[in-house]
Image: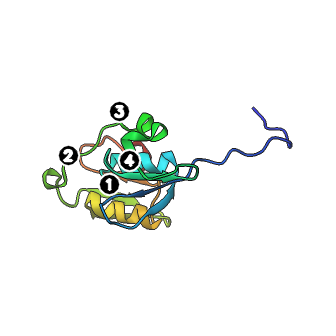
Amino acid sequence: LFRSAMEPAVEPVAFYYTAQAGGGASGPCSIAQLRVLWQSGHISRETMLWRESMPAWLRLEEVPEASSALLSLAQPPPAAAAPVGEWYYVDADGRQRGALTAEQLGVLLRGGDVDGLTQVWRSGMAAWAELSCV
């Protein structure tokens, strides 16, 4: 469908989050970006979220837009059980990088060095896939 010139563009909801108690806010993030953070184990149902028009920070599980999009998705096992150095990715120049832990990949995600469209792979995957799909 095409929008007419008179229809305003719909801006994605921009959430801010704090992954640790007392930690600084990160963001803004779209629901798609929160999905990547959720599936990589960097945020959980206890993560505090805020967006414009919310009077206060709330736990992710208390925010309908986020909880309905994320709570049914799988999360990795706790970090202690996860193997070290298993992720690989393709950088902006098309070079394969890795091996990285999930935590290191999360740092790259938060820093903007990778995003949901970045191709990633780890042992057990049949093929490379976009980070937002794993």
**First along the sequence among labels 1 and 3:** 1
**Image: 128 above or below 85:** above
SS type, badge 4 = loop
**First along the sequence among labels 2 and 1:** 1
**First along the sequence among labels 4 and 2:** 2
**First along the sequence among labels 1 and 4:** 1
Residue behind mark 4: 128
At horizontal 57% and vertical 47% (from top left) the residue drawn is 13
Residue behind mark 1: 42
Tell me whether the residue at label 4 lies in contact with that at label 2, contact meaning CB atoms closer than 8 angstroms.
Answer: no
Residue behind mark 3: 72
SS type, badge 1 = loop
Using the numbered discs, state the Cα–Cα distance from disc 2 to disc 3 in whole angstroms: 15 Å
SS type, badge 3 = loop
Using the numbered discs, state the Cα–Cα distance from disc 3 to disc 4 in whole angstroms: 23 Å
**First along the sequence among labels 3 and 4:** 3
What amino acid does circle 1 point to? His
Residue 118 is situated, as x and y percent measured from the top left of the image, at 45, 55
Q: Which mark is residue 77?
A: 2
